[in-house]
Image (spheres, rainbow, N blue to C red):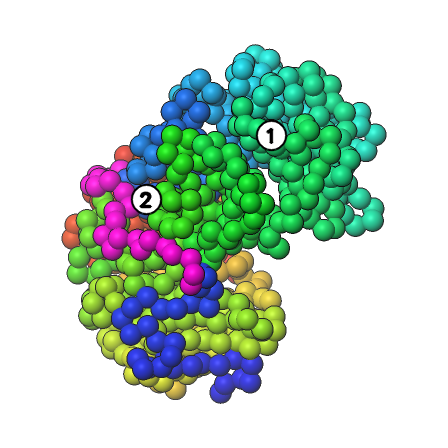
Amino acid sequence: MMQKFFQLVIVFSLALIATNGAASQGLLDADPSIVHTEIPAKMGLAAPVAANDDTWTSSGPIGGYVTCLAIAPSDPNVMYAGTEGGIYKTSDGGVTWTWVGDIYMQYGDTPSTTNFATILDLQIAPDNPELIYAGTETGIYISQNGGRDWTNTKPGYVFVNSIAVDPSNPKNILIGIGRSDMQSDHEVIGIFKSTDGGETWVEKLPRESTGEELDSVKTIIFDTNDAQTVYAGTRKWDELGGYNSGLRKSTDGGETWSPLKEGLARSVWKLTMTPSGFSPATIYAYAGFINNDIYASTDQGTTWVPLGKPDSAEGFLVVDPGNAAMMYTSGPDSLYKYDSDTEQWTEIASGEFTKRPSSMVINPDNGDLFVGASQGGVYQSSDGGNQWVSLNFINTNINDLAVDPNASQTAYAAVDGVGFSLAKTNNTGGMWDYLVNSETYLNAVAIDPQVPSTIYAAKDTQTLRYAGSVAFIYKSVNSGQDWDKIAYLECIIPTCEITIQKILVGASDSNHILLGGTGDNGTLVRTRDGGMVWDELDTNTTTAALAADPNNPDIVYGGGTALNLDFVFRYNDVWGDWTSTTLFGPDDIGIVHDIAVDQGSRVYIAASDGLYRWEEGAEITHFTNLPTGPINTVTIDRSVSPNAVYIGTNGMGVFVSKDDGASWTAMNDGLGSLFITTLQVSASQPKVLYAGTKDRGVWSMTIGNGHSISIPLYLPLVVKE
């Protein structure tokens, strides 16, 4: 039954790769010479807030994919984190974080109501920690109240990579514009200047004026000793197969610009400079054409000397304001320190917790380092990088949720990313705790309905050192305190990948476990003895969704892709001599995201082109009385009659139907228009609905008799022939 390039490996407690009740050693572990502070086992991820009836509560975890950090010059305890899910703020040096607002994309006069803008750069006014400037892919936004409200003062096709605020006059602002990988004829590229705090903008370096037709301005800094002197890193795709252009300098506050190319590589990506008064005043540039390097100039950019950067350094550049001899930079998963006194590089951190570091800020009062990682949250070091601790701010893209069937206040969240583990709440999301012995990169979680203290989790795909990939399955028998690795799926041809997206535990037999996932050649795997022996059932279909019939645990429905076409299957006698029946084919449905089955054995399918329902002996129903667009998830409360059907959308929140889909009601009071990744409703009282989101953590609602915001939609259904 096994194919030669796909293996199922059973892991016993004495095997080398077993965890034996402790955090397992991953394939991508950090350098053992780097000392990291353990995350406390009971570190709370959000302030205790009870879920309200019919109103959504943001219960945490706090954070998101960090794209940039900014520290207030006038109050270093104030920091802002830009993420793909909004702006977060700390006023106590990173101890606690609060979401303060969203920035929505805006290409014209009207902002989007569903698409968040990615924050590319954040800058804070030197004299006001509440005045913030944010660069995004649709312009520059300004907030005068600490990020709660934003105004787009430069809308349109404006991709703002860098913002520089004049330290001597905060009304003077320069922005660098241009997206090199997606050029268009109507896109604006160059340098713009504002002299009125961002209300109006004047173009100072159009791409045509340089004679090189720039494709982007990547970085801008003011000279720390002379605010009239400004430096800008620019680039242009060269026909020879690399980036050209280089550094430009202004000596009149950004009004006019001239190129500087002596001794510097022909593309400048990042710039930083030693603080005022330091001698010699030094500018650092991360630059390159074919062989990238980090350069230093002590004569205001006239000449440059390469520093022989570490092989993987390619990210931010930051000089310590309290010790200007120290300059910091980053690689894809490493941090480095350069000592200009000794001219030596030192790696200060590596491994998963610094995966894709995006930015660093340094507290000038105490020298604390803060690193924002695009996949790992925010980390702090108080000793120059020797030891690091994860702050109360992590990645918040929720892959999966599981609710204890006997205790609605207890739920588990599989959180995407690194640097943290499975999250658990025991008070309906009022507080989330790390489960420190569970793995990172978790993609699925499930609770044994017979023995709720038994939890299963699946680790997302990891690339093997030489070829293929591997996905792990873990089990805890004490509510997540300790974990054992019970099996792993290994794909051993060069380009294959495996991801376990769904874990289904048998409703009547705890030894029955079904795994559904994606892979180059399909993934549907079962065990009938609690994980001792595993069988590969379907080798030709990737299975992204699984749901059992509540009236017959031997019938399971699955949705996935075979031969690049999308199907919905019914697996009969799945724990015995299983067979499969095709219910939907590629002419009937889009990409399947989720499946749920109601008390009448009717199957609801959330798909990329809407919501569908199938039942024996009836036509396929496509619910067109819902907003158009993908339906990401569906869950059913089978304790009421008729069953309540909840769906999560791609940016339009959550809807419910209590009349078999004849009408739908939006239930977004307090939630807004978030991207919903997964929904779970509790089986016990009080009834709680949990929603996992993209980049905004878990939200929860105690379900009452009505919903605070009701928008009935009475559109006709379409029955597919």
Q: x, y percentage for residue 94?
A: 34, 37
Residue interval drawn in magenta: 32-56
Q: x, y percentage for residue 162?
A: 59, 31
Q: Dot 1 corresponds to which residue?
A: 280
Q: Are marks 2 and 1 in contact (CB under 8 Å)?
A: no
Q: x, y percentage for residue 655?
A: 36, 44
Residue 142 visible within the image: yes
Residue 110 lies, with reference to residue 574, above or below; the image says above
Which secondary structure type mostly characterizes the magenta part of the structure?
loop
Q: Is residue 236 magenta?
A: no
Residue 148 visible within the image: no
Task: Identify the amino acid type marked 2.
Answer: Asn
Q: Residue reaching furthest front?
A: 342
Left or right, 364 with reference to 168: left
Count residues near mark 2 (Cα–Cα under 10 Å), then give few for <14, some for 14-19, many for 20+: many
Q: Is residue 48 magenta?
A: yes
Q: Return the mark for residue 392.
A: 2
Task: Identify the amino acid type marked 1.
Answer: Pro
Q: x, y percentage for residue 353?
A: 43, 54
Mark 1 or mark 2, which is nearer the start of the sequence?
1
Question: Which element carries disc 2, helix, strand or loop?
Answer: loop
- How far is the residue under mark 2 from the one under mark 1? 38 Å
Residue sitting nearer the eye, 127 or 84: 127
Tell me the residue at 29%/68% (across/down): 22
